[in-house]
Image (cartoon, rainbow, N blue to C red):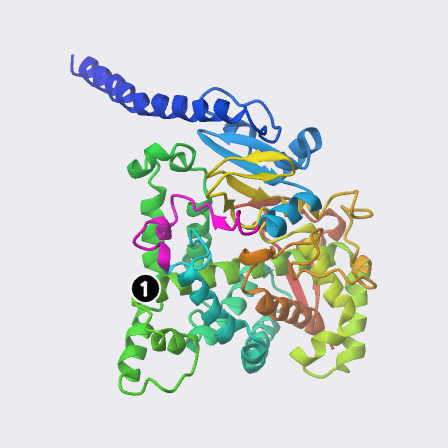
Amino acid sequence: MTETIAREATYLFFRILLLPIIFFILKHFKSYFLSKTSLPLPPGPSPWPILGNIPHMGKKPHITLTNFARSYGPLMSLRLGTQIMIIGSSTTAAEEILKTHDRSLSARNVPSAVPAKSSKFNHLSLGWALECNDRWKNLRTICRSELFSGKAMESQACLREKKAMDMVKFVWAKEGKEVKVGELVFVTVFNMLSNALISRDLISLEKEGVDGGMKGFIRKYIELISAPNLSDFYPILGALDLQGLNKKAKEAFMRICATWEPIIEDRRDGRRGNASSQKDFLDALIDNSCSNDQINYLLLELFAAGTDTSTSTIEWAMAELIKNPESMKKVHNELTRETKQDLLKETHLPQLHYLQACFKETLRLHPPGPFLLPHSSPNSCKVMNYAIPKNSQVLLNVWAIGRDPMIWEDPLKFKPERFLNSTLDFKGNDFEFLPFGAGRRICPGLPMAAKLVPLIVASLIHCFDWSLPHGNDPIELDMNEKVAVTLQKEHPLVLIPKVKK
């Protein structure tokens, strides 16, 4: 009897739940068919009833959407639940989305699990701000002047070099032992950032691997906000948070921010009555009257974006060089020739042309954000003679563009030489090569990434010879990918260092 009542209550619950969903879907499809009287939507695979194209996406959406583009063209549309997604997969689509219609499409499509999506916190966010308003511009200005300007980058050079040397010393003690490259690099990048932001190390190389460490917390946070979410596919369900992703993301946010919150309070206490002296980025934020909430959100975004993308890029670069010994040898020879066995400095980097080509080639094959961050269309507009409906999510598949055989010769081959006599760069002007994006939403941390990634890769190669465990053949190295927001190695890279004599 009790079991029957429970079953009937469950059925009733789902009937009540489905009524607003069906109403919303019918309303949504009505607006879709009305739009057919003007420009058509971009083509795309036929959606399933209710679910749309959700079942088509699979675990590797960058590959799925690249394959779809071969059938449906460089601009296509999908339905994820009730939501429309527009995907560009060519240089023409990239230029229209990020240049021609940059103003119209520079809004941000924010996943429901991101804590900053709420109206209470949206104005605190840099990467996830819903629109490019004056508050967002002010945050960008502070970050650019205090962190990413030429003057700021030059003043931080010694800190980055010191952290790179700390990494080298740690690896010296690991000679002949297995080293998890991702964990090693994550700590190094994290502490480079933390010294620029708050003038101290927050984690240590010796303790980072324990219980997953800070890398585990940040990766968990990124996975939560990027996971497939019913609240994104059916916004009417957003307040219910049926999968608990928003709740878990907030908990992860609070746990990560607890690492530096005492430092913020100590700094505020120490600076009362002495607001004129600036020492680091945290001081600049306090002097600009930023609240603790503002500082927490901004620091988390900078740490999460800066460490995860840089770590994955360095891990991919080392994997490609291990797998391509001729390229590794050329980097070795260039480092020996240009540094003359001296300690590696950032001032050496401009002369390391082949290393820089390897950096670019890694970004081409393995862009840290295969779709960049999702844009949105606050108003309907026209792209490539197709209608982009209001509130559509707009993605650019830079992974597909970087492997397009119409643009690149031998696109699947790691071939740094393609960049040696090329003016092609990643600063947002060349639409066939956009690992950092372009337009208003171009990655603000590009200047820092362009310094620290080559510095860390060069330091690892300058001081050590590397091999795979158990004498495994580098040709057989697993290069499978997985995607959260960033493109990561499915199986973390593990190498054995040998100190160069």
Q: Secondary structure at mark 1?
A: loop
Residue depicted at 68% across the width and 37% down the height: 74
242 is higher (above) or lower (below) than 199? above
Q: Residue at x 55, y 45 (%)?
A: 483
Q: Where, by quadrant of the figure, is residue 69 drawn? A: top right
Residue 217, given in percent of the width and then of the height, sits at 41, 56
Principal secondary structure, stretch drawn in magenta: loop
Q: Amino acid at mark 1?
A: Ala
Residue 119 pos. (x, y %)? 32, 51
Tell me if 261 is positioned left or right of 140 in this view: left
Q: Position of residue 448 (x, y in %)?
A: 58, 69
Residue with the mark numbered 1: 258
Q: Nearer the viewer, residue 443 or 438?
A: 438
Residue at position x 41%, y 83% in the image: 278
Q: Residue at x 63, y 67 (%)?
A: 450
Front one among 136 and 60: 136
Residue 114 showing in the rendered view: yes
- Residue 205's spot in the image, x, y percent? 49, 69
Task: Look at the image and give the residue range highlighted in magenta.
Answer: 102-123
Tag count in the figure? 1
Residue situated in front as seen by the camera: 292 or 4: 292
With respect to residue 48, does 350 lie above or below? below
In the figure, is residue 56 to the left or right of 26? right
Q: Quadrant of the N terminus?
A: top left
Is residue 500 in view from this perspective?
A: no
470 in the magenta segment: no
- Location of the C terminus (image quadrant): bottom right
Q: Is residue 103 within the magenta segment?
A: yes
Instruction: Say if 14 sits above or below 397 in the image.
Output: above
